[in-house]
Image (cartoon, rainbow, N blue to C red):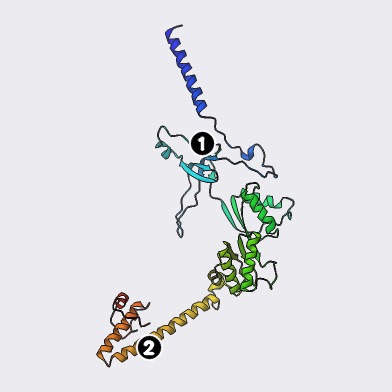
Amino acid sequence: MPLFNTRFALLAACLTLAAASLTAQAPRESFATPNNGPGTLPMGTIKGERYKRLIIRGVTMLSGRGTPGTNRAMPPEGPVDIVIEGNRIVDIVLMDPVNTAGQGKDFQRATGEKIIDARGMFVMPGLVEMHAHLPVADSYGPRGLDYAYRLYLGHGVTTVRDAGTGTGLKTMTAQRSASDANTLVAPRLILCQRWPLPLRHWDVGNTPDKAREMVRQFKTLGADCIKISKSPGHYPDVMAAAAEEGKKLGMFTMVDLKVSESDAVVASNAGVKSIEHWYGIPDAALKGSLRRLAVERGRQESREAQRRHRSHDQERYELGSHDGGVRGQSRQLAGCHAAGARDADAPGRYPRRPRFHRAWCVQAGMEDVG
């Protein structure tokens, strides 16, 4: 055999061994298949696949980030590789040409037990349905709830806050547990119990003490939150008691105020965290509403207080005009009060008063006239 051919054969053998070695070191990656195969996902499917390490490769990311109160927001970013371990995103690797050019020759693309080829696709944070009334079990057939869950998931809704369903908490808490354990194809469920219980009864939960007891009952039944949509839950003192007791137990309160004596301001001051259907919000701005009455009352009290202060200071000023020593102290006191007043710079309020800073008054050991 010629020398050239021998060397070529040895080189080919070496390359074959090297390729085999690389193949052994880098096992073939496993890519996910839509619906785990051809066709659609069977309706009865109640279990998905879970991986210790999942890679979403080549996707365009909508982070949802932005500056509140402005039109500034993060534009779509990508392509990126998203690394998920368990149920947590542990890394996002920028894979655009500019960033990959600086990775270096030893860069290795992230891999895992399963890879989703998401080129040309978008990923975004899951949407939250803030107000739902899930259908009563079997009202739309034997799999009515399953159908509702899949509609939500199919449209990117990963959390549903149910504001009250006729199915009842006994069934819904079991559904919530199954969803949390990934034995049910469903969004994460946040369950509110409607007020009062039983519904449409005016003689239950109609006092602050009864309200607190009812909230404790809701907690025992497994509710995550309180939904007040009818009187007597709309009574300001009852609403405040329910919200306060719920806060102690880790439950938030949402209200559907309808047209009642409580508007959005009253509800907010009572500790309510969520106001539904826009009721009570425009009411708070109407003349004659509790909000406006409170504002007008506050303004009236403020004007009366100012008149009392002006009269008080004027008397001291006139008293000091008969005695130089008293007059000097009176002017200092009037100046101290003016330094702490909101309208201290308004002209004509204190005749010929000197300017004093509140800190000077405290340092001198003098009390504020007001």
Residue lying at the far bottom of the rendered structure: 322
Q: Residue at x 64, y 52 (%)?
A: 177
Q: Position of residue 171 (x, y in %)?
A: 69, 55
| Residue underneath mark 2 | 311
Residue lying at the far top of the rendered structure: 1
What kind of residue is marked 1?
Thr
Tell me if label 2 and label 1 are in contact, CB under 8 Å.
no
Looking at the image, residue 369 sits to the left or right of residue 268; the answer is left
What secondary structure is marked by label 1? Answer: loop
Q: Residue at x 57, y 53 (%)?
A: 127
Q: Residues within 10 Å of mark 1 (few under 14, many from 20)?
A: some
Q: Residues within 10 Å of mark 2 (few under 14, many from 20)?
A: few
Q: Is residue 80 above or below residue 211?
A: above
Q: Position of residue 69 (x, y in %)?
A: 46, 60
As drawn, the label of residue 83 is none
- Give the CA distance from mark 2 to mark 1: 80 Å
Count of numbered marks: 2
Q: Is residue 78 above or below residue 152?
A: above
Whether residue 274 is visible to the viewer of this picture, yes or no, is no
What secondary structure is marked by label 2? Answer: helix
Q: Quadrant of residue 367?
A: bottom left
What kind of residue is marked 2?
Ser
Q: Position of residue 184 (x, y in %)?
A: 66, 48
| Residue underneath mark 1 | 111
Q: Position of residue 271 (x, y in %)?
A: 54, 68
